[in-house]
Image: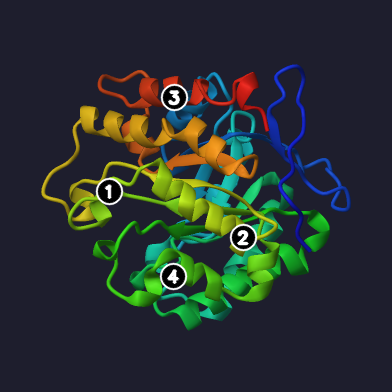
Amino acid sequence: MSRRLVAALVGVLAVGLLSAPASGGAGEAGGRPVVMPLRGVTLESVDRLDEVEQALARHTRRPTARIVFQHGSDPADYARAVRRLRDDAFLMGEILDSTAVRRTSVAAYRERTRDFVRRFGRRLDLYEIGNELNGEWLGRPRTIDAKVAAAYDVVEGRYADLGLRSVITLNHWPSHDCYAHDWEATLPFARQLPRRVRRGLDLVLLSFYETACSPRAHPGVRQFASTLRALTRIFPAAEVGIGELGAQGRADGLPSDPTLAEKQRIARRYIGMHDRLRAAIGPRYVGGYFWWYYATDAVPWDRPHSLWPTLEELYAGLGRPSDSL
């Protein structure tokens, strides 16, 4: 049983909130409202927890840290990180990265979701139940749909009394040069997802990497806004935003790693679209910008050539009173 991500006033700044429903109750362990716009960072690893915690704590505005629950891990591997980082960030748990979905059965995907929900409940502010779903590396639509529906039924069905918030991420493919199969196109894929998932999700994000397309793609505000507006119609109860961003390098199969200047360019270009996307879409646009390489590019926060100052500058500028939700 899902709910809308609703806007509310907070103090004199009138910023938005992702609120838990009244029926779920706040509870001692969580159910807290998530202040918007979302200022996202992604943590592929929580091994350097002290340094990650320091970087998150120093941001002027509270970020939302997306923790990737890696294949082969279990909730115990992240218990310490969830406990410590919750004081400095809102937390989104990614049940499984897209690269591991193909080799995970529907039953195992359901059980994995159940394990993480049982362990963390409301201590995670958001549950990403499907990552980059319209990518050929996940399998075929029928099995992808079955897995995301299984996770949805855990978060929004079996544990509906907790009032948890469900999230999916789709790839934003700006042209046919970005994907191999017709079914991967962003909006057609979104429309074919199971009806209960489409009608009940709380948040839908778009993942985008320029180098995922050949030739390299540089979509603008108009193209993002068109896709995001369409998503608000496909997912009538969901807010929308930008999911993963980042500058890919050798680890992603490219011939070289990006320079700091390239990382800064990408961060400024896409996070810098916030005001125009908000104006084009309205209050259902909630930001996001979950920089995938945060632990690599911005931690420690004060090391030479860190991306942290750029992300801090961009995130501190979001959510002024004129941008209130």
Mark 3 is surrounded, within 10 Å at the Cα level, by few (under 14), some (14 to 19) or many (20 or more) other residues, namely some
Any part of residue 154 in sight: yes
Measure how far apart labels 2 and 1 are at the Cα level.
Answer: 26 Å
Q: Where residue 233 is drawn, which disc sits there?
A: 2
Measure how far apart labels 3 and 2 are at the Cα level.
Answer: 29 Å
Residue at which label 1 appears: 210
Tell me where residue 273 appears, x and y as whole percent.
43, 34
Measure how far apart labels 4 and 1 are at the Cα level.
Answer: 23 Å
SS for dot 3: helix
Tell me where residue 142 appears, x and y as whole percent.
49, 83
- Disc 2 marks which amino acid? Arg
The answer to whether marks 4 and 3 mark residues whose Cβ atoms lie closer than 8 Å is no
Residue at which label 3 appears: 314
Quadrant the C terminus occupies? top right
Mark closest to the chain's N terminus, 4 or 1: 4
Judge left or right: residue 6 versus residue 323: right
- Disc 3 marks which amino acid? Leu
Residue at which label 4 appears: 101
Judge left or right: residue 52 versus residue 5: left
- Disc 4 marks which amino acid? Val
Q: Which quadrant holds residue 16?
A: top right
SS for dot 2: helix
- Closer to viewer: mark 2 or mark 1: 2
Q: Is residue 46 above or below residue 314?
A: below
- Disc 1 marks which amino acid? Glu
